[in-house]
Image: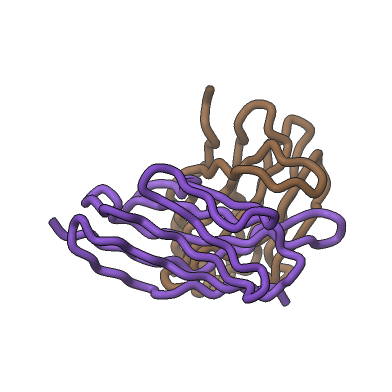
Amino acid sequence: KAGVTQTPRYLIKTRGQQVTLSCSPISGHRSVSWYQQTPGQGLQFLFEYFSETQRNKGNFPGRFSGRQFSNSRSEMNVSTLELGDSALYLCASSLAGGVNTGELFFGEGSRLTVL
Amino acid sequence: GENVEQHPSTLSVQEGDSAVIKCTYSDSASNYFPWYKQELGKRPQLIIDIRSNVGEKKDQRIAVTLNKTAKHFSLHITETQPEDSAVYFCAASTPSGGYNKLIFGAGTRLAVHP
């Protein structure tokens, strides 16, 4: 069974640009969550999608957005990039539905550097 | 809002010693507490979890304890080995808008020295 796949793995952007990151979940997983990982801050929750609907959102500005497609693949977009957006963006998929929380299966992440 | 605090941020032990990592959470409605291990350059992976109706859970050398009254939970690793060296994240599942969201702590970097 293929794991969670994230693309691109590495990217460099300049301030003011925008970026789109992609995540393909494990087959059969309908929940996709996104996290921002920075040194000392741990994993900051961005948002979670289930069956194309955003179920939850973290405390990030509106420059961060996402969506999920009918095949459960998800994308997140960051517009007007700032230096502080440099981070590893992790996607995780899960079988969990409703109020049940299950194991998250993480991708290897997309490392974004903003210059 | 919901918050998970994790201590210590770094922990260094000798091989064979025990290691304890502690987390506190703010939302009393939290009901699920997983621990993830992230080895250098790799993705986080679940190592153990506990639900709010259980006080302790063990899996070989690792165990997790939960004190709902005090809103804190801990990871215990016994007989540590060099391969236990990694960053460990605790998390708490918090109800939000009819669903749960997982809030992580800032992580503990564990170094096990031979």
Screen quadrant of the C terminus of chain A: bottom left
Residue, far left = B114
Residue, far right = B98
Residue at (26% x, 53% y) in the render: B79
Where, by quadrant of the figure, is residue A92 drawn?
Answer: top right
Q: Which x, y percent locates residue A70?
A: 79, 33
Asked if residue A14 can be seen in this view, the reply is: no
Q: Which x, y percent locates residue B40?
A: 32, 53
Where, by quadrant of the figure, is residue A59 drawn?
Answer: bottom right
Q: Which x, y percent locates residue A111?
A: 45, 55
Residue, far front = B55
Asked if B50 appears above or below A87 in the picture, the reply is: above
Colour pattern of the rendering? by chain
Q: A56 or B19: which is nearer to us?
A: B19
The chain whose colour is purple is B
Asked if residue A93 can be seen in this view, the reply is: yes
Q: Which x, y percent locates residue A4?
A: 55, 36
Residue at (69% x, 27% y) in the render: A28
Q: B70 or A17: which is nearer to us?
A: B70
Asked if A94 appears above or below B66 in the picture, the reply is: above
Q: How many marks?
A: 0
Residue at (73% x, 77% y) in the render: B1
Is A7 situated left or right of B20 in this image?
Answer: right
Asked if B73 appears above or below A11 in the picture, the reply is: below
Residue, far top = A1
Q: A14 or B89: which is nearer to us?
A: B89
The chain whose colour is brown is A
Q: B87 or A20: which is nearer to us?
A: B87
Residue at (64% x, 54% y) in the render: B54
